[in-house]
Image (tube, grey):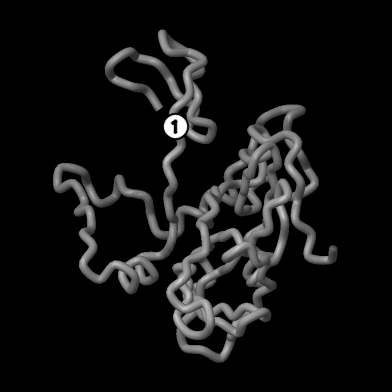
Amino acid sequence: MRDEETGSWWQQVSGQAIAGPLKGKQLRSVFCDEVSFGVWKREQPNGRVLKPDPSVAVKDYVPSDWDQRMTKVPVNIGDKLDRSMPPRTQIVGITIGNSDKAYPLELLVKQSPVIDDIGGVPIVIIVGKDRKSVRAYERVVDDRKLEFFGKNDAPEFVLVDAETGTEWDFAGKGITGQLQGKELKKVAILNDYWFDWKIYHPKTAVYDLGK
């Protein structure tokens, strides 16, 4: 990214200025939520949607099969390439404190919800019914660490904690039970390709379904 005021260039994953007058400066991270439009619309029925720019041809927008196309594009980063996974494996990356961890999206879809700890913080990672939208939360409420399982027969996403039987929706809100009205604390995630995440998080751990 290039800012118009100083002409500095910023790395989009780290938010650090890598060239120009502001080299070495750091942008402050802002929480963002990348979910399918269907999930967002259900949660934000009165939300506004950015219209396409009429001055830009439709063909110039990202096609719907962009992800599939990108899997065929070669990655050339020399000896920095970590071949423990195909470079364009889609992962969900999480950083808490000084600890980084990558979760292959395919494994998350198979196992959701995923119970884990990163940097000493208990978390739960969940995948929506659309099998695309992913969110993560701290799984501590009122100083109580919770264990979760999914209620797979529900028409919409429902998470249940084993300790109180409270049901939680995809937005991390308690909707029935003892903890109704409580909210799980959001954890920032980054949807990324494995090769890109590994470059900027060289000491990252990797989630393994078998462990």
Asked whether residue 120 is in view, the answer is yes
Residue 194, percent across and down? Answer: 66, 46
- Residue closest to the far bottom: 153
Residue 46: percent from left, percent from top? 21, 67
Which amino acid type is marked by label 1?
Arg
> Toward the viewer: 131 or 66?
131
Q: Quadrant of the N terminus?
A: top left
Q: Residue 80 in the image: state x and y as whole percent.
A: 73, 30
Q: Residue beneath label 1, please? A: 28
Q: Secondary structure at mark 1?
A: loop
Which percent across, then down, holds residue 190?
54, 48
Other residues around mark 1 within 10 Å, as few (<14) / some (14–19) / many (≥20): few
Q: Residue 44 sits in which quadrant?
A: bottom left
Q: Does residue 175 appear to the left or right of 61 in the view shown?
A: right
Q: Is residue 41 above or below residue 161?
A: above
- The residue depicted at 62 percent of the width and 64 percent of the height is 139
Above or below, 21 against 148 in this view is above
